[in-house]
Amino acid sequence: MSTRDATIAIIAHRDDMFSGQPRLVRLLIPRWEEMGLRVTVVTDPASACEADVAFLHVSLSLVPDAYSELAARFPRTVNGSVRDIRRRAFSRLLVDQEGPDPGRVIVKTDWNSGGWRELRGEILASTVGRWARPLQPTGRPWRWVSRLEAARPWSRRRALPVDAYPVFPSREAVPEGVWKNPNLVVERFVAEREGPLYVCRHWLFLGDREATRRTVSPDPTVKFRGAMENTAGRVPEELRRVREELGFDYGKFDYGIVDGEVVLYDVNRTPGASADARVHAETVAALSEGILEFLPSRS
């Protein structure tokens, strides 16, 4: 089989709004098509589809069984074994209510992306969700939901603003309700600094291809704002071991290096992207041919 005969089936959740959300894989698709590959997107887990390789791209921390079962029907699946990326599944920074003093701590959701994708799915599956389903996640009803969540007591909060995870000076300062909430976790706050700025490093990869980037911000919770810098840094072997342990074929690891310690902040198997595709041109060029590793033939 030649590359030109191969088909990739991208499996996305029906509520992901895959065609409307900026995702790195959407920028890879045109490059794959230029390489002669055919790409189809599947959002119905009951759909029958033939492809040489599946690309599991469900933007939930825990992949639903129906989508995992769909992925298993294909000869090979990118990220087929990465079902659970909840923070408790990978974080080495978790703090209990008892134990040695961890210093400064940060409160996050166990779920990725502040828990908003899971909360949105829960709402759309409810009776109220019948009218909310056609609406965009940035519409007025979702801003209303955001305000309601912010007003909930800590013990019942299901989601947090992804760009403002709260940082506390000590474990004792964490509200009691946080410890009682299974949706939330407490981690040691270990930040890489560059003068007054906070630094987050990014390792992006697909198969044997990779790219390293970094983001610098004045805010403790460093989030991408279109200022990601290309770097030529060596990827720490500790991260490569974690990638192998978790079974990642494609994704992005966020990390820092603090006093010689490699600190893993986040793992993501559905990396996002800026609305300006030019920001990611070098990343796309670096990663695109990584898909060849998963095809039946690399001829």
Image (cartoon, grey):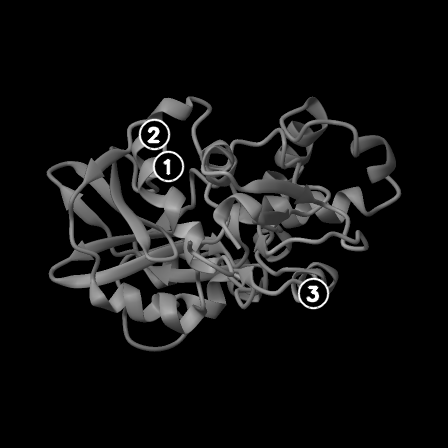
Label 2, residues with CA under 10 Å away: few <14, some 14-19, many ≥20:
few
Q: Position of residue 250 (x, y in %)?
A: 44, 54
Is disc 1 placed on a helix, strand or loop? helix
Q: Mark 1 — residue?
A: 284
Distance between the alpha carbons at the discs numbered 1 and 2: 5 Å
Query: Which residue in the rendered view is the most extreme toward the bottom?
Result: 99
Residue drawn at point x = 28 percent, y = 53 percent: 255
Q: Tell me, yes or no, whether the two marked residues, 1 and 2, touch with CB atoms within 8 Å.
A: yes
Placement of 200 over or under 175, stated as above or below: above
Distance between the alpha carbons at the discs numbered 3 and 1: 28 Å
Amino acid under disc 1 = Val
Say which mark, if any, is on residue 281. 2
Q: Position of residue 280 (x, y in %)?
A: 36, 31
Work out whether residue 154 or residue 59 is closer to the camera in this orientation and state it: 59
Is disc 2 placed on a helix, strand or loop? helix
Residue drawn at point x = 34 percent, y = 26 percent: 279
Q: Is residue 202 visible?
A: no
Label 3, residues with CA under 10 Å away: few <14, some 14-19, many ≥20:
some
Residue drawn at point x = 37 percent, y = 65 percent: 243
Distance between the alpha carbons at the discs numbered 2 and 3: 33 Å
Q: Mark 3 — residue?
A: 73
Work out whether residue 221 or residue 248 is closer to the camera in this orientation and state it: 248
Amino acid under disc 3 = Arg
Q: Position of residue 237 (x, y in %)?
A: 22, 67
Label 1, residues with CA under 10 Å away: few <14, some 14-19, many ≥20:
many
Work out whether residue 139 or residue 103 is closer to the camera in this orientation and state it: 139
Total labels: the figure holds: 3
Placement of 91 over or under 256, stated as above or below: below
Q: Earlier in the sequence, mark 3 or mark 1?
A: 3
Give the label, 2 or 3, closer to the camera.
3
